[in-house]
Amino acid sequence: MAFFSKLKDRLFKSSSKLEEGLDAIVEDGGAEEAVAAPEPAAAPEPAPEPQAEKQPEPTPDPTPAPPPEPVVPTPVAEPAPQPVATPKPAPAPATPQPTPAPTAKPAPAPQPAPTPEPAPAAKPGLLARLTGRTTAPTEVKRELDDDMLEQLEELLITSDMGVDTALRVTANIAEGRMGRRVSSREIKELLAGEISRIMDTVARPMPLYPTKPQVVLVVGVNGSGKTTTIGKLASQFRNAGKSVVIAAGDTFRAAAVEQLQVWGDRAGVPVLTAPEGSDPASLAFDAMTKAEADGADLLMIDTAGRLQNRQDLMEELAKIVRVIRKKDPDAPHNTLLVLDATTGQNAISQVETFQKLADVSGLVMTKLDGTAKGGILVSLADKFGLPIHAIGVGEQIDDLQPFDPEEFAAALTGLEKG
Ligand SMILES: Nc1nc2c(ncn2[C@@H]2O[C@H](COP(=O)(O)OP(=O)(O)OP(=O)(O)O)[C@@H](O)[C@H]2O)c(=O)[nH]1
Ligand SMILES: [Mg+2]
């Protein structure tokens, strides 16, 4: 319950955009029908006649949005040690509960003025409206045809799902259903099913190994959320009973060290620093030595944000990796690439670039709150298959959640569970 409503709440921009788009597609060319017993597939009908003047019927779900609930921090990975190189299976997420209709129904898309020709199908609805009784609930359905599929593809592409993924998802939805009349809820369910199928294989928490210290190198372009994510992760690992050390490998900016120290204080984790402008690789080496001496479970190394076109910075990252390997040839044991969801399709080229430079082992997608580009995650999962360890849904310490494909798909499509 808590998890789903929070994600839905946070993903509001994405979901409302997709949700509204899907509703509009079904409305556009759809016709209101009485909600009947499950229809037999494909009752081929002539082009649906515009019906007598209709007021958009309010759907009977004016449930107010639930109040924001306190965050339940869920460790991204389980503390129990695992044999090296065996990724842990996902820990059971805080059992999400179906949450009823958190959003108001968006206004239906404007419809062309219909001709006042009474359609036979409208009878019960019309009667009900005249008598003020709503004995026969109705819903809009549209025939799944090429036009509708094209609109669906476009919508998915604008939600940053990427052309290839959008085409494949749409084709899967179409398969065996052409000519069938579908409601917007059905389309949302089909879409959510496709999305969660793609995402299922990549939803994996960061694996933990018995190695001490397990070195976690955190990389990404400027401002993607590396430092914040380290703070959040350190806090979760610490709560799960791990001893954590953070190395402020961003020696590029003095403010970066201060920022990390603030996060270290919040998480209750020591932060190792070096003077501004000093060599981050030698800081990383010193941090390894210290973490070893302290018997720390995890060493998280923050790095300076780098532009993909800054060759010197990119080389610096490679040097950090070389140097820590002198201490432990298997390090870093995890290389997390932090991506900002608001950058949309640009995330694709970031993954490609960082994969060349470092052995990226998993992704964290930040800023999924407040973006209309949540579809990028589907595109990344489809294209690279890299594990998605966690998602950032806010700036606070608890705003990092394990990635749950079903919840994500439901939140993204605006599917109301329950
Ligand atoms: N809304 C939201 N903001 C986030 C999230 N994660 C990080 N931020 C914000 O994004 C901004 C940049 O985050 P940082 O953690 O400093 O990013 P960084 O990658 O370390 O940046 P550089 O060190 O400059 O490369 C900060 O204002 C964070 O509060 C998130 O999940 N949601
Ligand atoms: Mg930073």
Image (spheres, grey):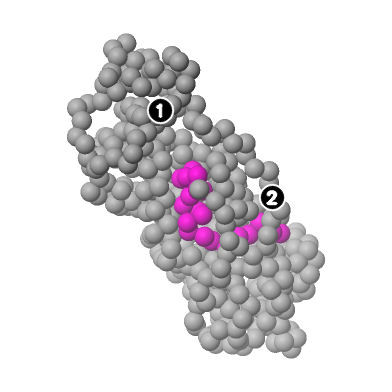
Label placed on residue 69 = 2
Mark 2 surroundings: few (<14), some (14-19) or many (≥20) residues within 10 A? few
Q: Position of residue 259 (x, y in %)?
A: 75, 60
Check the image and report above or below for 32 versus 302. Answer: above
Q: What residue span does the magenta drawing correspond to? A: 397-417
In the rendered structure, the answer to whether residue 44 lies left or right of residue 387 reads left
Q: Nearer the viewer, residue 14 or 178?
A: 178
Q: Position of residue 395 (x, y in %)?
A: 68, 53
Residue 336 appears in the picture as rendered: no
Tell me the residue that label 1 is attached to: 136
Q: CA distance from mark 1 to mark 2?
A: 36 Å
In the rendered structure, the answer to whether residue 169 lies left or right of residue 280 reads left
Q: Residue at x 21, y 36 (%)?
A: 43
Q: Residue at x 53, y 86 (%)?
A: 83
Q: Position of residue 138 (x, y in %)?
A: 40, 29
In the image, what residue type sits under mark 2? Glu
In the image, what residue type sits under mark 1? Ala
Q: Position of residue 175 (x, y in %)?
A: 24, 49
Check the image and report above or below for 392 versus 158. Answer: below
Residue 405 magenta-drawn? yes
